[in-house]
Image: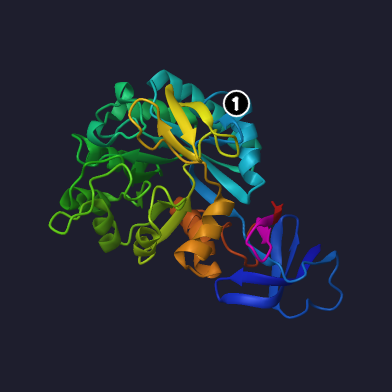
Amino acid sequence: MTTLTGARVVTREGVLAPGWVSFDGGVITGVGAGSPPAGSTGVRDLGGAWLLPGYIDLHVHGGGGHDFGASPEDLAAGVAFHHAHGTTGTLISLVTAPVDTLSEQLRWVAARAEDSPLVLGAHLEGPFLSHARCGAQHPDHLLTPDAEVMATLLKAAQGHVRVVTVAPELPGALELVDQLREAGVVAAVGHSDARYDEAAAAFARGASLVTHAFNGMRPLHHREPGIVPAALDAGVPCEAINDGVHLHAGAVRLLAHGPIVLVTDAIDATGRPDGSYVLGGQEVTVRDGQARLARDGALAGSTLTMEDAVRRAVREVGLTVEAASVAASTMPARVLGLTDRGRIEPGFRADLVVLNDDLDVVDVLV
């Protein structure tokens, strides 16, 4: 039994300050305000630090110089890099590539997910995306929605595909949403030129996430509002890359009127110096921490960590620590249907992150 005490514990009911959390065998056994019960063992005083549920990143491609799609070893090392920044659950995001390549990468993810509690499965960001809004996705590998191709990819992943991004305006896209729902996979709307009605039709069909809201999609217009307002109307969570580059703070606050999910969309350049990198076979130039395609300057992922995303959410956007915690942990767990992560409650996994007053990560427990 371990008991953490003297912390500002962020719970669903509010912040317990001071509060305590006990856990045994990796499972939270007790949470309370004030001092822990007499006789508590393994007591560790956190000295007033913040204690939050571990972060869950639904959209990340690499970090620390490691591209998840390069090799199984790079996948493991990239996950470890983000773990050090507070991420206790990683959804491995794979960019558009030939089907054979994606199948091989999915097998790596499946093997890692079986071995590591840090890996939650795979997010396929493509190949069923819009050429008009492909962003940094390789245009040569985009496909029209195809049930057989999707079945091939699902088989390669051995049940570990958790999210697939699709452009709902493409022929066969709504049928693909049906296929994903039947397979227990989250259909996300993104890299799409869909109008409001087309997006709303996808959400009505069962799509339940928006991939990096406002990026890679038709801009919001008062007469043709597009994807984000359709998602807000439907109560569908929207991913937000909160790095100050992909989204203005005001746009993040707008998304926070509905369910918002903080993600990184981080690439291998995260935590590394400016320079030249590769994403999905395309050259990426990183300057002042901004990653852009060398060929046309399109944003190509980010150099963000969840640690930075949460800190910015509080310091720059103006969310409370509690709201930022929901966006970084509780809501992504809910999107994936994980009933044992994302909250500090008895019976939940003891995946925890300790933050100082500046919201820097000082310890991570899994």
Query: Dot 1 lies on which element?
Result: helix
- Residue at the spot of label 1: 72
- Asked if residue 29 is positioned above or below residue 19 in the image, the reply reads above
Q: Is residue 206 magenta?
A: no
Q: Give how far across and how far down residue 43 sits, in percent.
A: 84, 67
- Asked if residue 103 is positioned above or below residue 359 in the image, the reply reads above
Q: Give how far across and how far down residue 218 sits, in percent.
A: 23, 46
Residue at 80% across / 62% down in the picture? Answer: 2
Q: Is residue 356 magenta?
A: yes
- Asked if residue 259 is positioned above or below residue 276 in the image, the reply reads below
Tell me where the magenta segment starts and ends, as one range.
351-361
Residue at 67% across / 72% down in the picture? Answer: 8
Tag 1: amino acid: Pro
In this picture, residue 80 sits left or right of residue 206: right
Q: Nearer the viewer, residue 295 or 313?
A: 295
Q: Quadrant of residue 188?
A: top left
Q: Nearer the viewer, residue 125 or 47?
A: 47
Q: Nearer the viewer, residue 249 or 94?
A: 249
Sort mark 1 into few (<14), some (14-19) or many (20+) by Cα contacts within 10 Å. Answer: some
Q: How many marks?
A: 1
